[in-house]
Image (tube, rainbow, N blue to C red):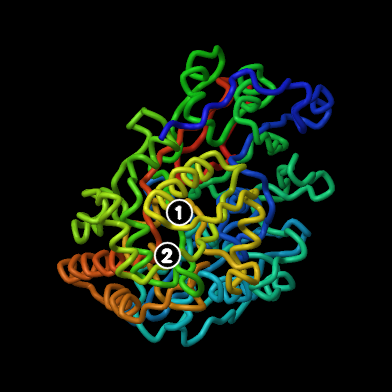
């Protein structure tokens, strides 16, 4: 299938909303960024949307931050003490941290924030199941007591999606299934609510009371030194308009330009094209395991068999094969958990007749599959177009419902049947860096109503994951990883579409951009 083509000329820049204007000069040094999607929610516990994650790294902080090699290092804490065979962790907050409302960051804020996160996050739920106590014996000390060892605790507390961000107790006590009513963190940027224009612009101002660590920066670890006065996100849904704005100098940085536009951007004077995220994203389709035909594992297996990952990646990323890896299994290529179990399911394509036979064997009778198709996200749009066409080829009745990504984020929480506004499947991009082992590959979980949207229930998968977490034997952990992947090909918690590695583009006047899975705006200077 050919990629959708976009006109390079695009709309007139003067007509595009939210572009830079000379008036910005009076507000100090401004970095103008074009994110991958509009920012519909700012609560990084309530949603796993990537654009929310990216905003959250500016506004909030976590106890640990991952460096560019994904190693967790103390961020909000001076350090930790581990006792009782990794069952007791004592964390000491560093001095001088304040929230954007001027209040001190206290240990009780950490306790309340972690408790809220543990309700929503898959790894947080794992910690909660082992938790004997989470205490704040004084203003700067947090004690975590566990019933079982959990050596990966710093990795868990440094994760970014959903993120265990620390917020004031008054906000952390918000129902985890409702968004916080106010955005107050302790990060190096503060949220400028009065300048937020939904679908057009978001503004982040340097937080003057932020005290960075006295260490060299390395992605989300080390010292977060802010070198601009403001960062403005301008939402430009037309990729050509965004590219033209970068070339003309009206914006400074595009998070993920359309791959078709990369050759033109590489030729443009004053523009740099490069890969910031070396890990990229796992493209996936998440089926609903509660209702409709996708609740049938036989139908899910047939849907997986209908997909050609390479076809999907070519549609999303173009013909430059350095921008993607396909086919992939359920773990990140190159990690210890990558294995060959079940890989014949994605390496060897089945013909149309064979997939139709799988559907017949599963008892599929032409019931509609409600496909939530986000048209405002370039990669998801392309993946959806290919997947919907592949499903139709094998006889699946696809109800392709076009909508923006913000609507998908809202609607995917709906657990009702299809005739009550429910859904069957939607595309997603999982941070590939998280799919390195069974602990962090949380969308492999089968914990039912506590699972991510789609809600698969698979006690066997849960038991194998628990055994992997408890094991300290590398050979046994590898065997369990193989069994988990084999089980995933049998139950299909999600349909892998490939690992894509988008490039970013920025003006050569920017320097100091840090590599890592999340675009960060500290350490960045603008000439």
Q: Residue at x 33, y 60 (%)?
A: 302
In the current view of this chain or complex, which residue is farthest to the left?
A: 475
Q: Is residue 499 visible?
A: yes
Residue 40 locus on image (x, y percent): 69, 52
* Above or below 283: residue 255: above
Mark 1 nearby-residue class (10 Å; few <14, some 14–19, many ≥20): many
- Label 2: which residue? 443
Per the model, the C-alpha gap separating discs 1 and 2 is 9 Å
- Label of residue 115 in the image: none
Relative placement, left or right, of 262 versus 347 is right
Please count the marks in the image: 2
* Above or below 216: residue 96: below
Q: Residue at x 83, y 28 (%)?
A: 26
Between discs 1 and 2, the one toward the N terminus: 1
State the residue in front, 408 or 86: 408
Q: Is residue 218 visible?
A: no
Residue 129 locus on image (x, y percent): 45, 83
Q: Residue at x 59, y 57 (%)?
A: 61
State the residue in front, 372 or 72: 372
Q: Quadrant of the C terminus?
A: top right
Mark 2 nearby-residue class (10 Å; few <14, some 14–19, many ≥20): many
State the residue in front, 119 or 345: 345
Element type where label 2 sits in the image: helix
Relative placement, left or right, of 297 versus 35 is left
Q: Quadrant of the N terminus?
A: top left
Residue 510 locus on image (x, y percent): 58, 26
- Label 1: which residue? 430
Residue 364 locus on image (x, y percent): 40, 68
Relative placement, left or right, of 182 versus 153 is right
* Above or below 263: residue 481: below
Element type where label 1 sits in the image: strand
Disc 1 and disc 2 in contact, CB within 8 angstroms: yes
């Amino acid at each position: 299938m050919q990629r959708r083509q976009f006109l390079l000329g695009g709309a007139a820049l003067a007509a595009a909303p939210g572009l830079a204007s000379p008036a910005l000069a009076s507000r100090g040094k401004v970095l103008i960024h074009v994110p991958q999607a509009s920012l519909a929610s700012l609560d990084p516990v309530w949603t796993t949307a990537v654009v929310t994650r990216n905003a959250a790294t500016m506004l909030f902080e976590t106890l640990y931050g991952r460096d560019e090699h994904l190693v967790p290092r103390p961020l909000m804490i001076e350090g930790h003490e581990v006792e009782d065979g990794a069952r007791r962790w004592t964390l000491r907050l560093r001095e001088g941290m304040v929230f954007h409302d001027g209040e001190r960051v206290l240990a009780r804020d950490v306790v309340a924030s972690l408790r809220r996160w543990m309700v929503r996050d898959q790894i947080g739920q794992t910690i909660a199941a082992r938790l004997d106590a989470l205490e704040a014996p004084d203003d700067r000390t947090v004690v975590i007591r566990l019933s079982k060892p959990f050596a990966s605790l710093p990795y868990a507390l440094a994760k970014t999606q959903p993120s265990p961000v620390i917020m004031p107790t008054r906000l952390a006590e918000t129902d985890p299934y409702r968004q916080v009513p106010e955005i107050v963190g302790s990060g190096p940027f503060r949220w400028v609510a009065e300048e937020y224009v939904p679908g057009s612009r978001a503004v982040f101002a340097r937080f003057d009371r932020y005290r960075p660590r006295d260490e060299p920066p390395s992605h989300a670890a080390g010292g977060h030194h802010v070198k601009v006065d403001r960062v403005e996100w301008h939402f430009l849904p037309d990729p050509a308009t965004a590219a033209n704005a970068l070339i003309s100098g009206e914006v400074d940085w595009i998070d993920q330009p359309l791959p078709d536009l990369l050759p033109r951007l590489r030729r443009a004077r004053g523009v740099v094209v490069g890969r910031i995220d070396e890990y990229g994203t796992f493209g996936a389709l998440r089926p609903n395991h509660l209702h409709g035909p996708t609740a049938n594992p036989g139908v899910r297996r047939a849907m997986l068999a209908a997909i050609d990952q390479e076809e999907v990646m070519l549609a999303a990323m173009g013909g430059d094969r350095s921008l993607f890896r396909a086919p992939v299994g359920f773990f990140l290529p190159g990690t210890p958990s990558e294995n060959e179990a079940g890989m014949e399911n994605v390496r060897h394509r089945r013909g149309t007749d064979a997939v139709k036979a799988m559907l017949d064997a599963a008892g599929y009778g032409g019931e509609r599959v409600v496909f939530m198709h986000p048209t405002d996200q370039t990669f998801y749009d392309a993946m959806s177009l290919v997947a919907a066409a592949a499903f139709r080829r094998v006889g699946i009745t696809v109800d392709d419902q076009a909508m923006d990504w913000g609507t998908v984020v809202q609607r995917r929480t709906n657990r009702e049947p299809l005739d009550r506004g429910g859904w069957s499947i939607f595309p997603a991009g999982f941070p590939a860096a998280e799919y390195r082992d069974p602990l962090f590959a949380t969308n492999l979980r089968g914990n039912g109503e506590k699972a991510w949207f789609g809600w698969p229930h698979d006690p066997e998968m849960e038991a194998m994951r628990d055994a992997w977490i408890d094991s300290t034997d590398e050979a046994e952990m590898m065997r369990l990883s193989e069994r988990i992947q084999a089980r995933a090909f049998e139950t299909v918690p999600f349909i892998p579409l490939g690992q894509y590695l988008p490039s970013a583009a920025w003006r050569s006047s920017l320097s100091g951009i840090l590599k890592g899975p999340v675009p960060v705006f500290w350490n960045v200077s603008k000439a």
